């Protein structure tokens, strides 16, 4: 009984280092448990050792962030999902079930994303 109850709540987050991406530094990190069923983790990435990400780097980091979301989801109970909102791109949201996600990479000083973990259905 206890097991199914736990799957209906978000009981843990990942650690700060789990959000790191090689070639970037974190310029901001906030976690907000909005309810037992939803956790939003906002992360701002800036380039390591330079001022701006070029479009090719943005494309690469967007893929890594998508992979990270999928990896997080794989470590969680089956009914807890992860999605990522790319705040610099008109709040465009990637869901792990979405293979055709695209955005128009461009130069950025900071890549702002929000990982959202949520209970998709109740058990």
Image (tube, rainbow, N blue to C red):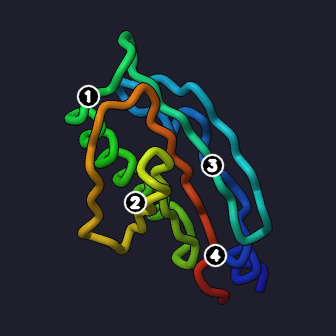
- Is label 1 in contact with label 3 (beta carbons under 8 Å)? no
Which of discs 1 and 4 lies nearer the camera? The answer is 1
State the image coordinates of residue 61 (x, y, percent, origin top left). 32, 39
Q: Secondary structure at mark 3?
A: strand
Q: Secondary structure at mark 2?
A: helix
Residue 119: numbered disc: 4
Horizontal side of residue 27 vs 3, given as left or right: left
Disc 1 designates what residue?
Answer: 54
Residue placed most toward the observer, 70 or 35: 35
Q: Earlier in the sequence, mark 3 or mark 4?
A: 3
Q: Secondary structure at mark 4?
A: strand
Q: Where, by quadrant of the figure, is residue 28 drawn? A: top right
Horizontal side of residue 121 vs 97, given as left or right: right
Measured Cα–Cα span from mark 3 to mark 4: 15 Å
**Residue at left offset 69%, top offset 55%:** 12
**Residue at left offset 43%, top offset 59%:** 92
State the image coordinates of residue 13 (x, y, percent, origin top left). 65, 51
Residue 41: numbered disc: 3
Measured Cα–Cα span from mark 1 to mark 4: 35 Å
State the image coordinates of residue 1 (x, y, percent, origin top left). 77, 86
Disc 2 packing (10 Å; few <14; some 14–19; many ≥20): some
Q: Where, by quadrant of the figure, is residue 3 drawn? A: bottom right
Residue 91: numbered disc: none
- Is label 1 in contact with label 4 (beta carbons under 8 Å)? no
Q: Earlier in the sequence, mark 1 or mark 3?
A: 3
Measured Cα–Cα span from mark 1 to mark 3: 25 Å
Q: Earlier in the sequence, mark 2 or mark 4?
A: 2
């Amino acid at each position: 009984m206890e097991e199914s109850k736990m799957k209906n709540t978000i009981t843990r987050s990942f650690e700060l280092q789990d959000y790191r991406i090689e070639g970037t530094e974190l310029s901001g990190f906030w976690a907000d448990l909005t309810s037992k069923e939803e956790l939003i983790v906002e992360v701002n990435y800036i380039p390591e050792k330079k001022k701006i990400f070029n479009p090719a780097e943005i494309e690469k980091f967007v893929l890594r962030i998508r992979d990270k979301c999928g990896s997080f989801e794989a470590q969680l109970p089956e009914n807890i999902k992860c999605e990522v909102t790319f705040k610099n791109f008109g709040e465009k949201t990637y869901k792990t079930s979405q293979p055709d996600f695209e955005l128009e990479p461009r130069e950025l000083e900071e890549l702002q994303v929000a990982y959202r973990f949520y209970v998709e259905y109740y058990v």
